[in-house]
Every structure is written in C-alpha cells, then in structure tokens.
Image (cartoon, grey):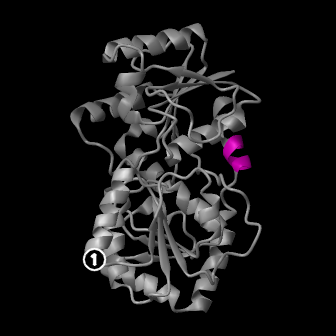
Amino acid sequence: MKIAFLINNLSNSGGTQRMLCVLSNLLIDQFDITIFVHKAGASFYQLDTRVNIIDLSSEKSGIFSKNIKIYKILKEKRIDFYINLDSNSILFNGFFLPRKTKLILWEHFSLETNYNKLIFKLSRFYAVLKCFKIIVLSQSELVAWKKYNKLCIDKLSLIYNPLTVSPLLAPPSLLKKKFLAIGNDITVKGFDILLDAWELQKNKEWSLQIVGLSKSDIDMLNRIIFEKKLSNIQLFGRISNIEKFYQNATVFLLPSRKEATPLVLIESQAYGLPAIVFDHLPGVLELLNDSGIIVDYKQKSTGFAAAMDKISNDFEYLKSLSSAAIMNSHRFNTESFKKSWVEIFND
C-alpha cells in the first residue's frame, strides 16, 4: 500500500512536523511513504531515509500547475491514500485526485479558530465533500466538525497525538523551581501574557525558560524583559532535543490564546510536569486529568500569576499534580497511535 502526505515544509520545529515524522517512521516498515513539501530543506526531526521526499518548490507557483503536478505524481506512483494536514489547502494542493487515490484530512488546526477567509471556507467545504476520512486530535474537535457539516459525521475519527519523547526514567525535578514554556509564536502562545504574569508573580526563587523561539521573537521578548526589568528568565531558539528541558523543569506553562491539541502538553505530562493553562481551550483541557491548574482566561496575566504563586508555594500540592501528570500521560502511546492509523488504511 502506498501513502503520500503533504506539508508546507519539514524543516520547522512545530508539532505538526514532528507528528508527520513520527507517523512516517512508524509506518515505513509496512507501507511505501512519500511526502510532498512546498519548501525544500532537511527535516528538523529524525525521518527514516526510506521515506521519499518530493519537493514542489521548483514548480510554477500557480494553483492549477501545483494541482496538476500533484495529480500526475499520485497517478504515476499509484498512491492509495493522500493525506493532507490542513483542510484549508485542498483547493491548492489536491483539487484533482486520481480515481485510485483516497483523500484523508489529518486536521491539525482548531476548527473554531481556523481562518475564515472565503477561499479557506470553500476549500474546507470541498475537502469534506471529497475526503474518505477526517482525522481530528481531540474530542472537542470531533464535536465541532460534526456541528460544522453533517457530511462529516460518518467520516470522522479521533486519533490522539502520542508521546514522542523518551519514557520518564527519573523522578521529576520538583526541587529545581523552574517553569517551562514552549512555542514559536509570541502572540498565539501568549508569551506576552506570560511576561506580564511573571512581573506579577511573587516567588522570586523560581526561574522561567521559554524554548522554541525565532531570533526575531527572542529579540522582541528581550526588549520586554528589559523594559519591565524582569529577572530569572532564559530564552532559547529551536531545539531538537527538547527532552533535556522537560527533565530539568518543574511546571509547564501554556498561556496560549489559541491551541488545538498541543503535543508539548502531552510530552510535559510524561515528565511529571503539572500544567498551568487557560480555560477557553477545550482541546487543551481534554488533555488534562487533575494534573494542572486551569485559569480563567478573562483574568489573563493576574490569574496566571496567581496560579504560579499557588503551585510554587505548596510543595504537597505540586507533588500531587506531578503524580497525576505521569498517570495521565499513560493514555498517549505510539502503539495505539499506529494501530489506529493502520485500521484507517484497512477500512
């Protein structure tokens, strides 16, 4: 059986890229895997050398030309399943498909906060009409898609993202007094809110690490840190070995304005890191199981600061949340992830 994926690029350090590499590596022993990319560049995450990468960046930029190119490759390679990771792009990257090829949407973005331009709405609607299956990452997204279009109901499947980090080999670093946040977009991830909260929080013995930033975002946050005269903060760029940050942290912070189903939250739980999150993100809340503090989004930085003070000043509370996080992480494993996908292909 032959499977093809499409993604903008593999060189970014995002959760979507990581999940695509994980799934490809899990399936490569059983299936012939091809990945279409629009931007050339080495994969940021480890990818089996048997996976075939097809670079579309040299093709003409027109929508029609790209669609024809993808169609021809799918037909020539006799691809059984074509998996697109964003329903907004089907008009641009899958309008024409060979009769043999079944379309699967692996939706990595929240439907509620997705782009609402007319062209994207049309693409999403067309994708629903054309696709064989729609794979979503959370129960809340499953409900949202059912409400969005009745045609989705029989096509939907829920497959949670799995843990992609090493199993916890040592107790979490509860005594290190270190908060950790991960992301690559200041506004979406709410890092400006986080720095406002850091200014308000009272426990100055704790430190904060923010990981995954671009150089421009690091410069921007450094300016905020300087203006607010903040201390005990370290900023880091893109990191492939994120495990070392989980291992040396105590609490995971997710002050996001928008999130679908953050992989970093699942991973941090495996390392016994309790989470502090906002209450307006159902996909995030679904991943917790009494393993974090939920803050009223209307309170923004004041609520987040209060939660940091609460968890940093009560060791027994911190310890109980940490134990709950480890137990909760057992729900997400690569074996069930792979099995669910193989069942989709054999349906």
Is 247 above or below relative to 220?
Answer: below
Q: Where does the magenta region start and end?
A: 334-339
Q: Position of residue 261 (x, y in %)?
A: 49, 55
Q: Is residue 57 visible?
A: yes
Q: Residue at x 25, y 31 (%)?
A: 119
Q: Residue at x 35, y 24 (%)?
A: 91
Is 113 above or below relative to 81?
Answer: below
The image quarter in which residue 27 lies: top right
Is 305 above or below relative to 126?
Answer: below
The amino acid type found where label 1 is placed reads: Lys
Query: Considering depth in this image, is 328 or 28 the residue closer to the camera?
Result: 28
Query: Considering depth in this image, is 194 or 96 the residue closer to the camera?
Result: 194
Quarter of the image where the N terminus is located: top right
Is 294 above or below relative to 118?
Answer: below
Quarter of the image where the C terminus is located: top right
- Residue that extends furthest to the left in the rendered view of this protein: 118
Q: Position of residue 260 (x, y in %)?
A: 44, 53
Q: Position of residue 319 (x, y in %)?
A: 63, 84
Mark 1 lies on a secondary structure that is helix
Query: Considering depth in this image, is 126 or 31 the residue closer to the camera?
Result: 31
Q: How many marks?
A: 1
Q: Position of residue 257 (x, y in %)?
A: 34, 61
Q: Residues within 10 Å of mark 1 (few under 14, many from 20)?
A: few
Residue 206: say if magenta.
no
Q: Is residue 136 visible?
A: no
SS assignment for the magenta stretch, majority: helix
Residue 336: say if magenta.
yes
The residue indicated by pointer 1 is 228
